[in-house]
Structure formats: C-alpha cells, structure tokens
Image (tube, rainbow, N blue to C red):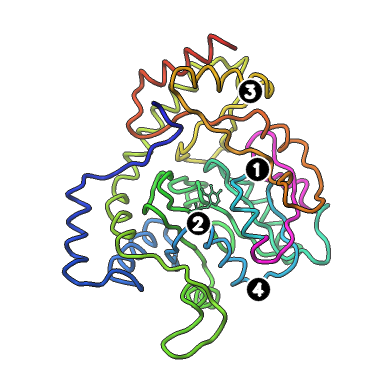
Amino acid sequence: MIPVTKTYLPPLEEYTAYLEKIWKSGWITNNGPLVIELEEKLKEYFEVKHLFLTSNGTIAIQIAIKSLGITKEIITTPFSYVATTTSVLWENCKPVFVDIDKKTFCIDPSKIEEKITGSTEAILATHVYGIPCNVEKIEKIARKHNLKIIYDAAHSFGTIYRNKQLAHYGDVSTLSFHATKLFHTIEGGAIIVHDDVLAETIKLYRSFGHIGNNYYTMGINGKNSEVHAAMGLCMLSRVPELIEKRKELYEVYTSLLNPQKISIPSVPEGTLYNYSYYPVLLENEEKLNYVTNALKNNNIIPRRYFYPSLNQLPYLNKVDSCAVSEDYSSRVLCLPLYNDLAINDVKRIIGIINKIL
Ligand SMILES: Cc1ncc(COP(=O)(O)O)c(C=O)c1O
C-alpha cells in the first residue's frame, strides 16, 4: 500500500541512546534537559529569540490566541486543516473567513480589509502546504488596523522566504511536529515569538499559569516530554536531506503530470520551498473521484487535503461563503510524498493519473 504520507523514523539505535539517557536520569517530563536542548537547537535553526515546545500544534495556536489577549473576531483562512478554525472557536473567538488567493491557496490579502470590523483583533493565516502567505501585504494591513498576526506555520518547517525562515514572520508563529510532518517529535509543536513580555506570558500559559506555588493566570498543560524531544533531536540534522529527497520526488511529479489537466499551487518568488506536500487541483470533483478510485484500485491512497472548506464546517453558525476555497476544496487532492517513496512508484502514480484524465 502507498499512503499519502509516511512517518520518517531515524535509526533506532540513535533514539534508544536518548532513551538510555532518560532512563538514567529518571527525568521524563516537566521541562527536562532534552526539551531544553531541542528548544535551543530550534532557536538557532529558526534564528529566533524565543521558541517554546508544546504538546501539539493545536494547543500552540490556542496558547498564541490566549496570550495575545484576543477575545473577539479573528480573520482567518478557510483553506487549512480544521485545527486552525477549531482553535479560534475553543478560545471563544469568532472566525471571520477571508477567501484564498487563486495561485498560492493562502489567504487573499486584497480581501482582508473589507472584513475588518471594530471587533477584529487579529489575522490568523496558514502558510498552507508550506507555501508563504503574502506576508508583506498582511503586515501592512495589520499595522494599519492595529491587528496582531498569528501564522499557522504547521506545514512550514524549513521553508525560507526572502532569506528568513518562514516561521520567523508575524507576531507569533505556531508549528506542528506531528508524526506526519517533515520534522516531527511524534506529537508536538512549537510557538515562535519575538516580544519578550509575550514570551513570558506564553511560557506561563503553557505550564498551568503557575511558577512554583504562585498562581498567576489560568493556564493549560501545553508542555512536551523528554521522549518527544528525543525524537526531535534525532530528526533535526536530517531536515536538509529530507527536503532534498522530497524535492526530487516533487520535481518528478511536476515534470510528468499533464499540465493541461492538473494545476498545482505556485510558490512565490524568493522562496526556498520545503516540498512538504504535493497537492493537485483537478478540473472538477468528478475527476477527483475518478483519480481517487483509480489510485485506490492500485492500493495507492491519496488524501483530500483540505476538505471541506472550513467556512462550511457543519457546526459553524452562518458564515460568509468563500467561492475560491469552496471550489478548490472540492477538487484538490494530495498525492503521496514521503522520504522512502520510490521514484518508480511516483512514475506509476503519474501513469495511472495521466491515463484516466
Ligand atoms: C495547518 C495545520 N494547523 C494545525 C495543525 C494541528 O497540529 P497538531 O496535529 O500537531 O495538533 C495541523 C495538523 O496537522 C495543520 O495541518
């Protein structure tokens, strides 16, 4: 079976060497030495002053919203994983959806200002598939209207935009280190922030809101453990090699899939992309179903990332429609892309698709 993605696992002996250290020290969670080591290494990697590991990428978004003191409306993208929207809802804020750009599939900045009201406090945008949002335009709008910017950078590990790590942009960026991601800690995530005061607030919220016996605020448990950090430490040095391998497969797809029948999101100029997904936009949903079934008949399992368009989630009360996102969600499919996927398998997938379209 060829799944849409497969977790990369480092050599077992490397991981067990860390486990032996953990067993010896008996320190398994609560900001242990491996969590601190990984945080330090990731700060260097991203060239940022503050980075906090979290238990996952969803709690990272929630802590970001809470720490910024946002309680009302958040402008957000309808084209992302469901956690982007549910984090807004869990924080009792109102998601206000702005449609996406036809080329990058990220939020369309030209449509943001018309959705700003007196209650708008932030923009929460996703660098979807690791492709940069239009960070310059978003920044301009946010500064003009005094809004905070949170980037859901869950897919962005390793993407560089205009000589800076993509996760560097915004007031806060959140990452997911889930096992399906390019860089992972089995479960996990991180919050990147630049402001010192905000960093202290985030740290407090991540650990129940208390330091020792002093209770400062109503926090949550967003920490991560030593066994998770150990996986991250095994993964980090491999990131360039993992990106290189994905690039190779990505380029095979791009060079051989029929461009008359399929389009892919464009990566803006100035980007060194991380090649974390291979999404294809088919002509319509019927074609998507053909392709899905043909691949499934060959034991190849693509995935409808992202479907449905988040403004159409069944538990939302009346929200505006987003024509581009709804259209794209109905006909976008992610094809298999992972480290040990063979080039011949990619060619086989392409052959099946080109034949039936
Ligand atoms: C865009 C996006 N945001 C947030 C998340 C949530 O991350 P996690 O699964 O680590 O909670 C994901 C997860 O897959 C995601 O794709």
Q: CA distance from mark 3 to mark 4?
A: 41 Å
Q: Are marks 3 and 4 in contact (CB under 8 Å)?
A: no
- Asked whether mark 4 and ligand 1 are closer than 8 Å, the reply comes as no
Image quadrant containing the C terminus: top right
Label 1 packing within 10 angstroms: few (<14), some (14-19), many (20+): many
Label located before the other in sequence (2 or 3): 2
Q: Of discs 4 and 2, which sits in the foreground?
A: 2
Q: CA distance from mark 2 to mark 1?
A: 17 Å
Q: Secondary structure at mark 2?
A: helix
- Asked whether mark 2 and ligand 1 are closer than 8 Å, the reply comes as yes
Q: CA distance from mark 3 to mark 1?
A: 16 Å
Q: Position of residue 342 (x, y in %)?
A: 34, 24
Amino acid type for the residue under numbered disc 2? Gly
| Residue holding disc 3 | 282
Q: Which mark is residue 69?
A: 4
Instruction: Name the side, left or right, on which 130 lies relative to 18.
Output: right
Q: Position of residue 11 (x, y in %)?
A: 21, 44
Instruction: Name the side, left or right, on which 263 lies relative to 325.
Output: left
User: In which quarter of the view is residue 90 placed?
Assistant: bottom right
Residue in the foreground of this view, choosing between 320 and 28: 28
Label located before the other in sequence (4 or 2): 2
